[in-house]
Amino acid sequence: MDFNPNAGAPISYDDAKKLIAAFKAKYPGQTEAVYLGRETFERALAVPNAAGIRAYFGLTPEGYTTLILVPTDKDNNSITSDGGGTTLGEYGQPCPPVCAKGF
């Protein structure tokens, strides 16, 4: 599969519910979601040459699944530093215990 810097598309609420339910059924008791604030995404997208964001899964010392956001350029290269510091985002709030209503 070739890299598509414009990957991603809207999905319906019903389709999202089905995908989330399938994940919960297959991985009961696991982290279901990670909340990251708007600033985290904006900071990653503001990095020069960032075409998008790749989200990596990680595991915190407390055992929560988390997401690490990595700005990625149009040629599929990770941008891990902008010369003035890290461009990576993490430290979101895992669900559970901090869960939203609706899914």
Image: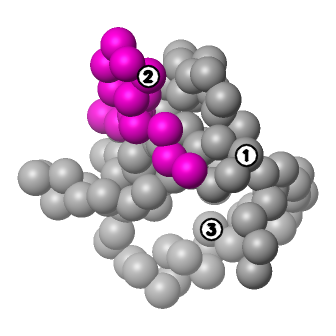
Magenta stretch secondary structure, dominant: loop
* Pointers 1 and 3 in contact (C-beta within 8 Å): no
Rendered view: 92 above or below 27: above
The residue at the far top in this view is 84
Rendered view: 75 above or below 46: below
User: Which quadrant holds residue 100?
Assistant: top right
Sequence-first disc among 3 and 2: 3
* Pointers 1 and 2 in contact (C-beta within 8 Å): no
Rendered view: 103 above or below 43: below
Helix, strand or loop status at disc 3 = helix
Q: Is residue 84 magenta?
A: yes
Q: Give percent across and percent down for residue 81.
A: 39, 29
C-alpha span from label 1 to label 3: 29 Å
Residue 90 falls left or right of residue 42: left
C-alpha span from label 1 to label 2: 16 Å
Judging by the rendered image, the residue that carries numbered circle 1 is 74
Q: Point out the image quarter for the N terminus.
A: bottom right
Q: Give percent across and percent down for residue 50.
A: 65, 33
Judging by the rendered image, the residue that carries numbered circle 2 is 82
